[in-house]
Amino acid sequence: MYKKMIIMLVTVVTFIVSFNINALTASAVPLDHYHIVITYTKPYKKYIGHKYSNWNTIYSAKKKTKSTFSKSVTWANSLTGNVSLSKGKLTALLGFNVTRSDTVTINVPFSFNGKYRQKVQYRKRYRKYKITRIEYLKIVGSSTQKKHLKAFAYKYDGVVSRVVRDK
């Protein structure tokens, strides 16, 4: 009788323990089920100044002359960095399309003195804007992380030319 009682007690305890473990496993929250909330501050733009491309030589000579040189130049607005904004929202914020590009014909007037070799050069000029925004990453039940997002936008603003002595 004592043996039967011990066997029955072990069976009941085993049943209860296995039932509780199954219940705990079923109600446990999986690790990938945490709630993450990402919010952003309103983006802010600030005009920084001009950015220039490298100088390009389009004509070089050693003779006295006065003329105008014409050339087709391709330009492109651009964006570096990421502030988590769509193209449409960036366009609305900046007032120009950051992916726009085009080809223009530039006319560069020049005058050479003929005393030494000279060259005509040009470079593209862009208006530079800094865009900033803060991203808040909140894991529910945990702390909030703050990340500063930054990007630079460049808008085509014409061509600068010069005549310099050629070496």
Image (cartoon, helix red, strand yellow):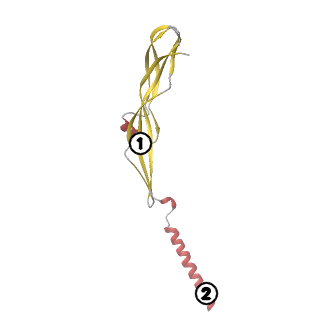
Kindly state the secondary structure of the residue where label 1 is placed.
strand
Point 43% across, 19% down: residue: 106
- Residue that label 1 marks: 132
Relative to 9, say whether 47 is above or below. Answer: above
Relative to 121, say whether 144 is above or below. Answer: below
Point 56% across, 78% down: residue: 15
Q: What residue occupies the far bottom of the structure in this picture?
A: 1
Which numbered marker is on residue 6? Answer: 2
Tell me residue 152's x, y (percent): 44, 37
Disc 1 crowd, CA 10 A, few/some/many (<14, 14-19, 20+): some
The three-letter amino acid code for the residue at tag 2 is: Ile
Tell me residue 143's x, y (percent): 45, 58
User: Which label sits in the foreground, 2 or 1?
Assistant: 1
Residue placed most toward the observer, 44 or 89: 44
Count of picture labels = 2
Q: What residue occupies the far right of the structure in this picture?
A: 3
Point 51% across, 68% down: residue: 26
Residue 45, quarter of the rendered image: top left
Point 51% across, 61% down: residue: 31
Task: Locate the N terminus and report the quarter of the image it occupies.
Answer: bottom right
Residue 95, quarter of the rendered image: top left
